[in-house]
Image (cartoon, coloured by chain):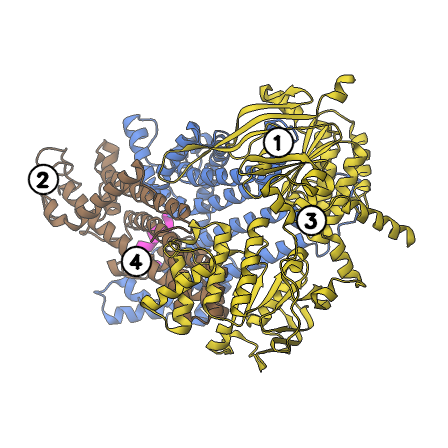
Chain colours: A yellow, B blue, C brown
Amino acid sequence: MLDQTTTPVLSVKNLKIQATSYPPGEKPKDITIVEDVSFTVQRGKVLGLIGESGAGKSTIGLTSMAFGRGGVRITGGEILVNGRDILKDSQSQLRSLRGQDVTYVSQSAAASFNPSKRLMDQVIEATLRHGILSKNEAKTRAIELFRKLGLPSPETIGDRYPHQVSGGQLQRVMTAMALCPKPSLVVFDEPTTALDVTTQIDVLKAIKEAIRETGVAALYITHDLAVVAQVSDDIMVLRHGKMVEYGATSQIITAPAQAYTQDLVNIRSELHSEKQENGTPILKIENVTARYKSVPINVLKDISVTLEAGHTLAVVGESGSGKSTLARAITGLLPPIAGQISFNDQPLPPAMQDRSKDELRDLQMIFQMADVAMNPRQTVGQIIGRPLTFYFGLRGSARKARIRELLDQIEMGRGFEDRYPAELSGGQKQRVCIARALAAKPKLIICDEVTSALDPLVADGILRLLLDLQAQENVAYLFITHDLATVRAIADKIAVMHKGKIVRYGPKSQVLTPPFDDYTDLLLSSVPEMRLGWLEEVIANAKMQAAGN
Amino acid sequence: MQGGHMSHAESVFMHPVVLLISQRLTIGMLLLFAVSILIFVGTEMLPGDVAQAILGQAATPQAVANLRLEMGLNEPALSRYLSWLWGILHGDLGTSLTTQKDIATAISGRLYNTLFLAFWAAIIAVPLAIGLGLIAVRYCDRWPDKLISGVTLATISLPEFVIGYILTYLLTVKLQLFSPVSLMFDGMSLAQKLNTIALPVMVLVMVVLAHMMRMTRAAILNVMESAYIETAVLKGMSPLAVITKHAVPNAIAPVVNVVMLNLAYLVVGVVVVEVVFVYPGMGQYLVDHVSKRDVPVVQACGLVFAAVYIGVNIIADVISILANPKLRHPK
Amino acid sequence: MTRPSFATLVGMIITSLFILAAIFANVLAPYGLAEIVGDAWEPSSSEFLLGTDSIGRDLLSRMIYGGRTTILVAAAATAVSFLTGSILGFTAAVVGGWFDQILSRFVDLVMSIPPLILALVILSVMPTTIVVLIVVMGLLDSTRVFRLSRAVAVDITVMDYVEAARLRGEGTVWIVFREILPNALSLLIAELGLRFIFAVLFISTLSFLGLGVQPPAADWGGIVKENKDGLVYGISAALMPTIAIAVLAISVNLVADWALNRTSSLKGGRGA
């Protein structure tokens, strides 16, 4: 028994992971994904692995089960689970490790459940397979876990099929599935990333309490430092497959040593303070109601907002709130069935087809997925140049000079004109889209979730660029997002949307100051804050409220 | 079904599955009706004049006019179509122009022969294709997979009659194992019959095997790449349990679909194979009467082939509806 | 840039050889198409490289002329099916509405019958001339091209870059030719190869059934029909055209496979 308390649950030393890449037309070559990574996880402790996409964090998480996706190989170092080197294990030893000693919770529970089997059968499958409990005991334990994780009707939810349960609930069922066989380590791989923020907090609470009550050790993988700060004891920061910084959560959050970590911690600071209203509205939306042809429900209900020239109005809401539909109504892709939209004090024709070229030019749009917002068969020069020719008739050297100017403005510089979108990084792609919008010299740009597909630091750079450009060109932004941190960073005014209605609207300082309406309160209190103990406070508040009711 | 665990009673009335299946059946009936119009229009309203086509370019105008009268071609197209349709609905497929015999009687025996051939081809091809598909998946990208893929690529690139003659040449002429012609007559024992159809069955098997095996492989690989298969592996399930408990239940629908689609394709393969082996089935009957320009026979055969083809496709649809858990257990 | 593999190169070379042989048939064929030069089914000799056919014509010459007919008819049918199918498919995708509905339902109807059966039904009343064969095969096959081009175009029209072009105020012509077509082209080119193979198999089958190219003109399917009776006596004349069909089909398949892989690996990169 003594051994059990001193041996770490997981100990990784000098881990090296490689994969083979097959570049078209060249010989296959080995690439190193992770190099020289070492860490330990003690019984009952949580280690957070954090990094941007491509940092190798999920790959490291899966190596604790000696598993590699898509031809990934562990080529160096050792991995000890409860003191045993699992890299020396036989296949059958590995099978008894997986699902018994170490279990896994994936990002997309919806895809990770077998669609043709009932939830209960899947939750207790590993427990039965390894002979840990009898079938009845396993079911009792699963129901108990369902209850602990705050799932509705814990007695019967296991009888349902995966598609009959919501995404947030499914994520909690998957956590129950991981905890059911009483493992010594659970690997959580971005378990809340795909969820809306108000759902995320429920799952986060459930996971945190389940970890505490079962005393299991965990690896918690995420790209969101504020989230990992709430659940982990230690944090390891990874970048490009290498360790950047490794220490106690409090040290990483309050006194980061490395520049990269400092950037990550400071990311959610306010970039911009609110401008005063100047009384020159550029966009005025009055009592707009809209619906899609196929669905007999109003997706937008009586929306009224105003945006001033050179200002930023942030429209914030969760998926299904109608915020993207608002963008479609303004651009004329979905003409409203009631209400009026005025631009520059002139009423704007509701349908895009009826608008003049100048009206179209004045109102540009930037999309969420820069990948699909650019024609893959056109070069950067062609993409940025087309609005110049289309709206201003620029050709030849004049067009070339203007393209260069725009590339300078988006801080990309020369040499990009002849590149294709596929040759650019995610941040560069979004910059080109910004340049394309800017090329039209618009008065208003609609930004639809323009940073949500990007890594935090890259997103930060895009937001700073947008603010600089606003200062130079006096362009107004209608900024659609689900991310309150982004809103806080750049907005002058905020409109909070919920179920097709605006529930709160006004200058930033006012909207973000209490007293709040219920929904805004829920939304604001759900956004993870970059400080220790935030989640505990939320849990305590929720318990107090529940006791008060 | 796990007895005793039903949390809410599942009503049979207007259950989405019942609804969807009755929709599919209705669409199938409508499709068949539309096909009958298409076939009728295709044979009677195209620029070529049927009477002229039957008699040839050298016929005297008088002879053509007489034949038109005899065939009732001077009546409006709509009324001719309606009486044709009325006849079909009552089991009357019309009379052959060339033999003056009742088409329904002529077809029934031949339809049996054709289905007999297709049945044995399916009995052999389906398990073989699924088996080979599983082997290809099990050894994905290793030599057994590559060998199977290479051979099937070659057979996909060949028309049915080519496979037919190459096999005939090898097995009857070089090895002298079978008779090159498949004569069928009444009173043959089943063993005799099977021996007679061995060669055409082999050709048909080769024709559908390649497609069926390739599509089965793709369908199973698709399932094996799902996240829930990874979940099962990470639970420490044995490879066999992963396949039987998690892959198979989800692969059934796509594989059954693949099988049915290829059985529908078998209907076309039969036409050519019957000609190659002079086998007395529907296909040979149809081809014979196309060259004789015996329009009523062609119309009737075309409709029967289309009905079988559409019928098999509907069965495939129904099975994939039944196998879809999202439809079987609605929210 | 993806370099063609060995198999692809072999496919390309053989395909080109077939095309060259078809173009220069007059020069290459040692004897005339219908010229009777010897006895029936003479074995191969220095005089007749592949021997003679069922009525004493030089088999090699008939194979070369037959190849020209097969390739020409198949190519023309493919052209008909592509022009009709892709133009209607793109228009249906971009225009939408009742135009799309009517065309799509009609295509569903035609595709609910096996193409060979429908071809037999139509050919029972039409004169079997080369032009009729090309048009019938081309139109029947255009249903498949229609479905593919419509699906590809619909996939592309919902892309944000097409929406961006619409929002900019671009007209339909720009959207079809500059935004949709360049992205659909390589997929359609790969499909072109497959449709051509299908046309080769289709015309060969029809001729074999005696309903395609009519004698004395020859195509490969017809040559099989003319010589099939010899097989029983161990005369392999009928196998020659079957081998030619198989080799041509496999070579074109190899090239089409390469074109298809090239499309997917180039997704979003440089290229045609």
Q: Earlier in the sequence, mark 4 or mark 2?
A: 2
State whether discs 3 and 1 lie on one chain: no
Name the chain under label 4: C
Q: Which mark is residue B233?
A: 1
Q: Which mark is residue C38?
A: 2
Residue carrying label 3: A167
Boundaries of the magenta span: B284-294
Question: Pointer 4 and pointer 2: residues touching (CB < 8 Å)?
Answer: no
Residue closest to the far bottom? A346
Residue carrying label 4: C79
Q: Regarding mark 2 in the picture, which secondary structure is present there?
A: loop
Observer-nearest of A162 and A516 = A516
Give the image quarter of residue C62: top left
Name the chain under label 2: C
Which residue is rendered at x = 84% and y = 50% of the image? Answer: A541
Q: Say if A82 sits above or below C151 in the image.
A: above
Q: Which amino acid type corresponds to the residue marked 4 in the rendered image?
A: Ala
